Image: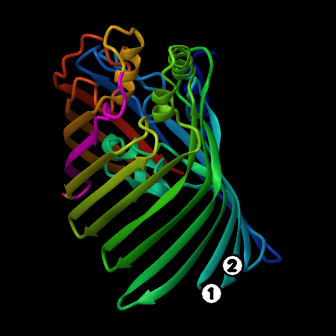
Amino acid sequence: MSPVKNLAAVLAMSFAAASAAHAEDGFSYRLSGFGTLGYAATDTNDVLLTNPNQIRGARENGSVLVDSRIGGQLDLNFNQVLSATTQLVAKQDTKGDFRPQLEWAFLRYKISDNTTLRVGRLGFPAYLVSDYRYVGYANPWARAPQEVYKLAPIDYFEGADISWQHSLADGYLTVQALVGHMSAPIVDTRSDSGRMKVNQLTGGYITYEIGNLRVRGGLSTGLASQRVSGADQLFAGLNQAGLDNVVDLFRVHDSRATFTSLGATYDANNILLMGEYGQRSSTSRVLDDAYGWYGTFGYRLGKWMPYVTYAGYGKSNQTGGYTISASNPLSVGVDSLAAGNSQHTVSLGVRVDVRDNVAIKAQIDHVLPSTKGGTFSGVAADYNGHSVNVFSVVADFVF
């Protein structure tokens, strides 16, 4: 079955589902769902628009596979202190197929009135909207700004976290600490699948909510290893050429990687303000210093909310510290891994809440990437860094 037909089948089945709740002898459950049906296209075939870890994307001919998804969540409450949550999301995977993926599966234990322990597969909490990133209805944009959300393309990890909540001044403070590991496939254009692993993952995040303001920030760090068949072949050639020192600089194997983020949302009356900054650093030249940021302003006019977003992304040039002759054919691959990259985007959009649980959004992105393509993939060899316009329409819903 083609990805588009597979998507249509999943969407059709989802409308037969409904929220449910049941309580008996202290046990209760709730089944809920969410989804997005989207279409995106660009004005050029020189680059490919994708979300993180996607191989199929949109060019001039457009695609429904970039933003479309359907998800379901089951919450079980066993008693006043013990509960469980499972979330499945069907979306495009790293092979380009549309299929369900297990995003969350954890037990929650309430240690005290203000302290909670969770164990299992947990959402990676690095972003401002991590708790509802795939629930498009809960977000203002057609898609989260790629300048920030492609920096650490990790959706979940296996391990545990503990959260402590306490009132502070007139607001509410939440302190969260996590420990665990993650292993997930990543996009590889060759026949073999790439994979990213992060061991000894630890992190800490603080959220403060006061009135209409919500602020969240923190950092995570771990030992990252990444296998991509294309890079493996390049490294093998470098080893044969006696350039082991270059391999050591670029190989992602137990490389310390750290991601720091800070974001805030102000949502009051007719005004929505959002902003977020993220920075990635690593001992590997491949994952080394990169940063991204965005700011969004929206203004509600009844059921309509026009919004504008300005975003930026940059990756430093890491060509120093090694020598390889330009006449060596391997230099092309090394320079590609080391090259800097950047992007700036202005987005204009409008959201219309057509029903209490359905929102339609239309968005235009005017993107100014560097010659390396910024956050785009599938960059043509002769791409000269010209501007790219992205046109998106999505229908977000919850049920």
**Residue of label 2:** 110
Question: Is 398 positioned to the left or the right of 63 in the image?
Answer: right
Magenta stretch encompasses residue 80 = no
Say above or below: 64 vs 26: above
Label 1, secondary structure: give it.
Answer: loop
* Category of crowding for the residue at label 2, using alpha-carbon neighbours closer than 10 angstroms: few (below 14), some (14–19), many (at least 20): some
Question: Is 79 positioned to the left or the right of 193 in the image?
Answer: right
- Identified by mark 1, the residue type is Asp
Label ID, residue 196: none
The residue lying toward the viewer, choosing from 145 and 142, is 145
Q: Where residue 310 appears, x then y in whole percent? A: 19, 47
The answer to which quarter of the image holds residue 300 is: bottom left
The answer to which quarter of the image holds residue 367 is: top left
Give me the C-alpha separation between circle 1 and circle 2: 7 Å
Q: Where residue 68 appears, x then y in whole percent? A: 47, 34
- Residue at x-position 50% and y-position 43%: 35
The residue lying toward the viewer, choosing from 266 and 48, is 48
- Residue at x-position 55% and y-position 19%: 239
The residue lying toward the viewer, choosing from 173 and 318, is 318
Say above or below: 307 vs 205: above
* Category of crowding for the residue at label 1, using alpha-carbon neighbours closer than 10 angstroms: few (below 14), some (14–19), many (at least 20): few
Question: Which region of the structure is painted magenta?
Answer: 301-323
**Residue of label 1:** 113
The answer to whether marks 1 and 2 mark residues whose Cβ atoms lie closer than 8 Å is: yes
Question: Is 371 positioned to the left or the right of 257 in the image?
Answer: left
Please state, as top left, top right, bottom left or bottom right, where the N terminus lies in the image: top right
- Residue at x-position 21% and y-position 27%: 389
